[in-house]
Image (cartoon, helix red, strand yellow):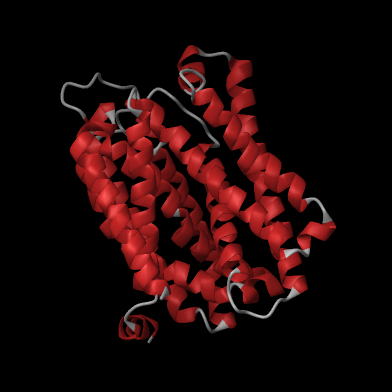
Amino acid sequence: MNLMFAALAGAIGYGGIALGWAMAPRNFGFGWLAALSVWMAWPLGAMALMLIHALTGGRWGKAIHQALAKGVRSVFLIPLFVIPYALTAQRLYPWLQAGATQLDNALYLNGPGFVLRGVIYLFIWLVLAVLVTRAADDADELARLAPPALILLALTATFAAVDAIMSLDPTFASSIFGLIQIGEITALSLAIAALALIFSATPHDPEALRQIARLLLAFVILWSYLAFMQLLIVWQSDLPHEAAWYLLRWRQGWDVVGGLIVLTHFAIPFFTLLSSTAQHSRRAVGFAAASIIVGGILHQFWLVAPFAGANSGMIALLTLSALLAMACTSLLVTRGNKRIWNWIEA
């Protein structure tokens, strides 16, 4: 029944994508990129959390192990979902367009380098996914794999965030932009895994739930601190090419979206999870986790959509439709043919 519901919801998502493409083809890439940046937090974050648990231990990782394993399997869908993004990239990035003004950082922001780096990211993620999937049930092997794998994940996720999102404005530079994205990836993936645990039939483990709640709180604090520090540094520097990046997101209603991000991505989960009573409550932790997910979706939309100019409503439709389609496809594939996963794990 769950798979039938996922298939129906996925069909609705793909229908919304087709409608958005037909009505606003020039804005399709922005909606797809916003959705892709949210969805990719799940497979990459699940892999990171599984590796972190291999090094640190704790009951939290055992409680969400099955959910994280399915998340790691979703990595194999990344090449499929990257195809529409790659086909529309020239419309997204001004430095890829014909006749683009020569940039000071053209040595990094150029077509061949962009494609080459993307292929490298995908190759590393797919190899790591195979290794982590095969070592998932062997704690010692996973612990040996964890240090180099986490370093590679951190580096590739950082550069991928810079390439895909920060370079939408080639004049903006931030040394902690990648760290902000890493903080969001871990927060989103843990929130998804927490909701999967809460809605599963797994017997309630109060200590595991408390540990998950505290980790969620830590990731919320980490993301909020990094995001605020970026804003503070830009504000005190008062440089036109940096301030313009925030000014674009503080006009024409984007300030309202920014306020909702602060509310859902920081205030609600932070003040909810501060309570020790809430940390033992499935409803409270689930509420905080859901708020983090909503905040993550709003944040990625707030990062990407303003560059498209008008028609933000259609981009929102495209983002939500694409995200629904990606999520349902992931659910169907990771719970699908067992032979494929048995071959990968062998």
The image quadrant of residue 280 is: bottom right
Q: Is residue 337 above or below residue 266?
A: below
Task: Tell me the quarter of the image containing the C terminus.
Answer: bottom left
The image quadrant of residue 343 is: bottom left
Which percent across, then down, holds residue 80?
Answer: 26, 59
Task: Tell me the quarter of the image containing the N terminus.
Answer: bottom left
Q: Is residue 300 left or right of residue 114?
A: right
Residue 127 visible? The answer is: no
The image quadrant of residue 258 is: top right
165 or 297: nearer the viewer = 297
Q: Is residue 118 above or below residue 62?
A: above
Q: Is residue 63 above or below residue 315?
A: below
Q: Residue at x 60, y 49 (%)?
A: 292
Name the outermost residue toward the left: 98
Q: Residue at x 47, y 54 (%)?
A: 41
Which percent across, then down, holds residue 73?
Answer: 40, 70
103 or 63: nearer the viewer = 63
Q: Is residue 108 left or right of residue 25?
A: right
Q: Is residue 272 left or right of residue 122?
A: right
Which percent across, then down, holds residue 152?
Answer: 47, 58
Residue 59 visible? The answer is: yes
Q: Residue at x 44, y 25 (%)?
A: 172
